[in-house]
Image (spheres, helix red, strand yellow):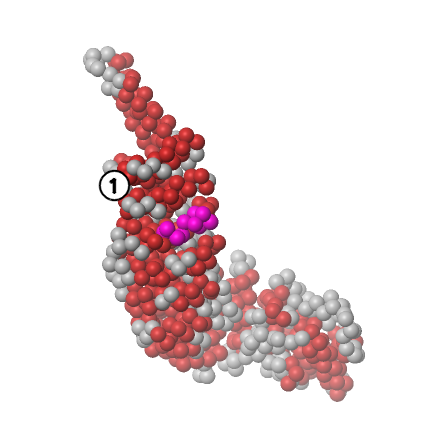
Amino acid sequence: MNDIYPSMAAHCYYVPANITPAYEQHEQEQPIEFDMSANDVSFERKIVSKRGRDAEDYETTGQRCTYYRNSVSAISAKRTKAVESQVREEEPLLADKERQAVNMLVDLFELSFYEGEPLKALSTLVYSHVYHLQLSAATAFSEISEMDTRPVTREALEPILYLLQSPHIDVQHGASAALGNLAVNMDNKLLIVRMGGLEPLIRQMLSPNIDAQINSVGCITNLATAEENKMQIAKSGALLPLTRLARSRDLRVQRNAAGALLNMTHSAEHRQQLIGAGAVPVLVELLGSDDSELQYYATTALSNIAVDESGRQLLWKTQPVLVDALIMFVNTSTIKVQCQAILTLRNLASDDQYQTQIVEKGGLDSLLPLLQSEYDPLVISASACLRNLSIHPSNEKPILESGILPCLVSLITQSGNEEVQCHVISALRNLVANNEADKTPFANAGLFDHIRAVLVNPASSEVVVGEMIAALNVFVLDESLWPYIIDGGFLELLIPLTRSQNVELQYNACVTISSLAGKASEASDRLAQVWDRPEGGLQSYLASFLTVDEGMDPVLRSVALWTVLLLLESDSPDLVRLVTGHPSIIKNIDKIASIDSLPEGELRNSAYTTDSLAGLRSSRGFMDGEGPGADDGPLDESDDEIYNRMITIAQDVVSLVQSLDI
């Protein structure tokens, strides 16, 4: 996991990066914690140093050694060429003694100062009572750590932590710079905290000296990238001074403090601790900064705080200007700030009040043009936010009146990005479900042509295909849209998916077929055409799911039973003849109907019970005479309820067959 890394007053690295992962709900997008690594964003390390330009250009020990060796080689080559050509006689460009000195210097750079004699020598200076010797040691450690950030031992850290407690600010300054540099290594991060490094760093944060603040806050920012350290940092009392320093007049201090606060927003517990430390109003204030880095850190931290319902409620009650500021950033030219602002709006739009407020304040006008951006992260962010905004019924009209429908439909196939495809089809599904008006404009925009193109494309992922089928199950319930589905050849695409190894995909395919069977009285010819094709057709799917087999999932069997019931209720002579004339379908249903109850203690092994049903929805309820769907809420039934419902539907089918004049 990457994190935000700080700038340091001297000899430290400035390496911003990450936050954390995204988790989604079916229908409504769950708030996310932003993950920079997912967007392939990287930052180069920069050194703030007082050395000359040459030294600044070489950031690692190996690079520096190469620089010195190249310098020696260049001089030696010149000398050799001059001697061999004998063009002129001159003094050697590099005397032997000078060459030896340079080589000794190169060798010195290749030594580890964190062990053996070099560490012993530095430690002697550290524990001296002479101020200048301690300063020399602190400076040496800061210089060495700038080049060499390998994992170190307790013996190497002890003298640095000792210097950190010096009464002299410049000695503290060098020691904290060294700790900040070493803290880019994960092993070192953990060891520094375990050895009690937080307490002296917090004392430095409280210093009025700007350089001390920069380095101490920067070091804590680095330490906060380790999950194990975050609880210790929260308990140490560091959050209050970090919050205060985020308001510093020095930009470097502000950046480091804001980065540290951001790194503490990766878990719900730490977010609550930040809220308790008063960080929220400070982060909102930072949105008004002219510095894009501060804008980015503050926006990202607020996005993470908005992951939690309690965080969103606090923002709603106390930060009335938040949405306006975020909408302003949606239109900024700094892309990373732009992306973060959209993602923060997306998280806020998990709540009804924010869904309407964002649209009322003009957020929709800012979002829609970004759907046509050539930069994928912007399109992903904008489509995810729009998906949440589309949930609220009052937003349906302004979204459709914006003229964005053709763009949304085209993105189903043209984006080439799985996340965008899922967000867009979910937004369209929400708009159809919320819209009481005629839905033919959706079909006229080519909606079903694009969905079909995804379903027939072998490169389409199961996730995308699953979202398309879930949307079809919503569309088929609409009187103006279902004819496009039944006449569009979707039954031929759904039947093979009933054998999918992906249980959710299999379930949604079965449920959508069942929903189409509900239109059998008006579409009997199309249903009869797919009775035995493709791949055995509808009859093969029904027969296999109705086989009396203990291994068959009772939920899937219930869906198949419900489909048979709908076909028989259609009053279509052809469908009734095909169903009742099948050699096994009615016979097996009769056997299922004769089961009294599930034997006591028998294992019910349903893939769709309890938590695994999250995301699978029911638009029609079995027990009140209606059937399964994929989109109205999770089925929360006990095994007995599922099993008894299956038997009840089977008995209804048997009764209906007996009443038919066959």
Kindly identify the residue that appears in the image at 79 percent across and 79 percent down: 596
The magenta segment is: 192-201
Residue 374 horizontal/vertical position (percent): 36, 59
Instruction: Give the quadrant of residue 545.
Output: bottom right
As drawn, which residue projects farthest toward the front? 129
| Mark 1 neighbour density, 10 Å: few (under 14) some (14–19) many (20 or more) | few
Q: Could you tell whether 120 is left or right of 489 in the image?
A: left
Q: Which of 537 and 263 is in front in this view?
A: 263
Q: Which amino acid does label 1 sit on?
A: Lys
Residue 526 horizontal/vertical position (percent): 61, 75
- From this view, report whether residue 475 is shown above or below residue 279: below
Kindly identify the residue that appears in the image at 40 percent across and 64 percent down: 274
Residue 646 among those drawn in magenta: no
Q: Nearer the viewer, residue 410 or 211?
A: 211
Q: Is mark 1 on a helix, strand or loop?
A: loop
Residue 196 among those drawn in magenta: yes
